[in-house]
Image: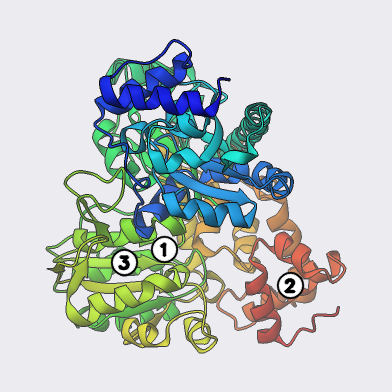
């Protein structure tokens, strides 16, 4: 490398008349010319710095890269902390996502915005290792006066692109930077070694994500027996697709998946997937696969075109109006709750629907919408627990034009605006991030919604129905949910009874689900043996109506005839029922509406605890319920936790 003074003199000649001596490295000379073409002033004092909200959006968009880099950055920072240097991770545009290393060097970087949120593209700050590595698509070391801007010339930097291990796309840059006096020719080799470590972690993460995605698909596969299914990862890559499904895609959507992925989804933020998939595949149903607040991908159901498509899995609800009379069940418990819900529907007050998982809370929400004053408007369901935390604000409240890099030019209307004139249905409302709760309260109080990045309130008129399987009042008292918001959304409260308290409703529902499943699978209408119905009455159904539906569909799928007997009942249901039956008298067993159903549930819980030898986590798994639900049941029945 030529001496610093000679580089400085060569740079001055270039600024003066645009000529570069042959001694200047080709990669540097090319970058100087690009910097000049971009109109970058040599006296620029630092890189542009984005606002915090935009940095948060970039962190969310590149969370897989950040997660894969965490270990490598941590290890590198231990070494660099003693070498007066720091390690930097950027996204593909050169925006700095993370820094680590010597604290004094990190502080020194703030002077030129070599910090989180700084944008180090050549077009913004001229020749520098990060921007030049992106422009040249190769590892680059830039030292001292080789930088285009004067104030950056006190640095020495070595950077290398990070490539996606599958498709070779540019994911970002890893850079080693420090004051010019710390120059080390081995810095570039060190940066490349860190890059390989990150790329290896990304490859392992992709394999893990694909495994979890496929595991989720296999768990749900029986629900889509007669449909063509495609599973895609978070970059649109097809992880699973049968030959018939891929033929169907090619026939009806030529070129959409020709590269082994649905290309338009590749770089699209997860918040925009629902609308994009509706546009790309209007006749398909999609289900996002979320794991630990991160979208792994989606399951796409390409409905059989020879017959009408069925609703998206998990939403057995019509798109039109849904009346209370369509909610099955004639037990006294259900008659009472339906009558109360009808009265509530005639008001405009916010309603909190409470009940265990799988009891059918959304059915009641839809019936309230159809009966109330907002029936002519949209019904907009939102699963608060299914939206990644970092995307919740933009998905729920929307965002304005230019709110962050990658934002749609025209902005994006959130779920609240989509529900204008109709009913907004918030499922798992207790999972709403605390930091967003004040903004929902403001919408309810003022009737105005503010998109992210905008100070302009947009008027909305909607009805709110919230749903939870938790004790939201206790959550509010404990500070895990805003108390003021709780009292605003729970003006009226509707408690949906669990299936075990609904007597012979279980038999009516079993016949209903059997009829629906047989029709969908084009099989004869099945008949249940009397003993099967006795088992259904005795079983405690911790998963409620949803579990009953899955059990019935499982029996029909795996059954050898249209006569379903005890052998067709899943083993875990039979085992728990046998334990219950042993503790009940014949009179108790034959009385479906008996209050001793509570005794049956207690017996099942005690049996599960005994089998798990007192291990509550194991017992909850055996029962198919959350551990928090088990704790509540133990308290309800006065069962000790030290069995």
Number of other residues with Cα within 10 Å of mark 1, as a class: few under 14, some 14 to 19, many 20 or more: many
Residue at disc 2, secondary structure:
helix
* Secondary-structure class at tag 1: loop
Q: Is 202 in front, or is 493?
A: 202
* 302 left or right, relative to 508: left
Tell me where residue 482 appears, x and y as whole percent: 43, 82
Does 607 sit above or below residue 341?
above
Image spot of residue 612 (x, y percent): 83, 65
Query: Where the N terminus falls, by quadrant?
Result: top right
**Residue furthest top as drawn:** 22
Of badges 1 and 2, the one in the foreground is 1
At a point 46% along the width and 73% down the height, the residue shown is 430
Residue 315 visible in rendering = no
Give x and y (percent) for residue 371: 19, 71
Q: Is residue 230 above or below residue 375?
A: above
Q: Which of these two is toward me, 80 or 205?
A: 80
Which label's residue is closer to the chain start, 3 or 1? 1
Q: Nearer the viewer, residue 517 or 480?
A: 480
Foreground tag (3 vs 2): 3
Q: CA distance from mark 1 to mark 2?
A: 30 Å
Image vertical order of residue 342 relative to residue 412, above or below = below
Which residue matches tag 1?
384
Find residue 605 and name its label: 2
The label number, if any, that marks residue 160 in the structure image: none
Give the residue number, with chain letter if any, for mark 3: 425
For marks 1 and 2, the one nearer the N-term is 1
Marks 3 and 1: CB-CB under 8 Å? no
Label 3, label 1: how far apart the Cα atoms are: 10 Å
Residue 393 visible to the viewer: yes
Q: Nearer the viewer, residue 460 or 44?
A: 44
Q: Secondary structure at mark 3?
A: strand
């Amino acid at each position: 490398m030529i001496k610093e003074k000679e580089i400085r003199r060569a740079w001055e000649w270039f600024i003066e008349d645009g000529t570069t001596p042959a001694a200047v490295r080709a990669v540097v000379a090319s970058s100087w010319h690009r910097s000049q073409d971009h109109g970058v002033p040599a006296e620029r004092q630092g890189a542009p710095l984005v606002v915090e909200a935009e940095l948060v959006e970039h962190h969310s968009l590149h969370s897989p890269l950040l997660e894969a880099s965490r270990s490598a950055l941590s290890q590198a920072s231990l070494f660099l902390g003693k070498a007066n240097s720091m390690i930097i991770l950027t996204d593909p545009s050169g925006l700095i996502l993370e820094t680590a290393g010597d604290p004094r060097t990190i502080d020194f970087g703030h002077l030129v915005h070599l910090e989180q949120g700084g944008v180090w593209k050549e077009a913004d700050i001229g020749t520098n290792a990060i921007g030049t590595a992106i422009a040249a698509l190769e590892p680059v070391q830039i030292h001292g006066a080789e930088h285009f801007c004067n104030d950056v010339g006190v640095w020495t930097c070595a950077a290398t692109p990070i490539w996606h291990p599958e498709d070779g796309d540019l994911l970002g840059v890893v850079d080693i930077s420090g004051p010019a006096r710390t120059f080390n020719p081995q810095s570039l080799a060190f940066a490349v070694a860190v890059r390989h470590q990150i790329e290896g972690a990304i490859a392992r993460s992709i394999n893990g994500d694909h495994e979890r995605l496929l595991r989720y698909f296999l768990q749900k596969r029986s629900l889509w027996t007669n449909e063509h299914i495609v599973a895609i990862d978070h970059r649109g890559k097809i992880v699973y697709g049968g030959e018939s499904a891929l033929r169907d895609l090619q026939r009806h959507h030529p070129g959409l998946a020709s590269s082994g992925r649905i290309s338009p989804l590749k770089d699209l933020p997860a918040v925009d997937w629902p609308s994009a998939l509706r546009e790309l595949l209007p006749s398909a149903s999609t289900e996002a696969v979320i794991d630990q607040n991160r979208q792994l991908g989606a399951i796409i159901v390409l409905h059989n075109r020879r017959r009408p498509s069925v609703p998206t899995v998990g939403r057995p609800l019509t798109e039109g109006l849904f009346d209370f009379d369509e909610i099955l069940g004639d037990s006294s418990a259900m008659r009472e709750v339906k009558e109360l819900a009808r009265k509530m529907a005639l008001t405009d007050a916010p309603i909190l629907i409470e009940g265990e998982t799988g009891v059918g809370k959304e059915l009641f929400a839809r019936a309230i919408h159809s009966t109330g004053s907002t029936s002519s408007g949209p019904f907009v369901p939102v699963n608060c627990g299914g939206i990644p935390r970092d995307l919740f604000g933009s998905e729920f409240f929307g965002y304005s034009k230019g709110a962050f890099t990658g934002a749609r030019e025209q902005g994006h209307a959130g779920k609240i605006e989509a529900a204008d004139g109709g009913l907004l249905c918030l499922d798992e409302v207790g999972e709403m991030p605390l930091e967003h709760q004040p903004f929902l309260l403001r919408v309810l109080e003022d009737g105005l919604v503010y998109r992210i990045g905008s100070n302009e309130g947009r008027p909305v008129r909607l009805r709110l129905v919230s749903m939870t399987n938790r004790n939201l009042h206790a959550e509010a008292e404990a500070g895990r949910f805003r108390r003021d918001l709780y009292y605003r959304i729970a003006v009226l409260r509707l408690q949906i009874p669990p299936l075990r308290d609904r007597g012979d409703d279980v038999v009516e529902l079993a016949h209903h689900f059997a009829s629906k499943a047989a029709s969908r699978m084009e099989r004869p209408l099945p008949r249940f043996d009397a003993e099967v119905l006795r088992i259904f009455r005795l079983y405690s159904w911790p998963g409620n109506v949803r579990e009953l539906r899955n059990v019935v569909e499982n029996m029909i799928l795996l059954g050898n005839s249209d006569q379903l007997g005890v052998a067709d009942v899943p083993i875990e249901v039979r085992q728990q029922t046998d334990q219950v039956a042993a503790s009940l008298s014949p009179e108790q067993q034959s009385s479906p509406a008996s209050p001793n159903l509570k005794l049956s549930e207690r017996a099942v819980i005690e049996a599960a605890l005994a089998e798990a030898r007192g291990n509550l986590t194991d017992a909850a798994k055996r029962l198919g319920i959350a551990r928090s639900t088990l704790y509540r049941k133990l308290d309800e029945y006065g069962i000790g936790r030290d069995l």
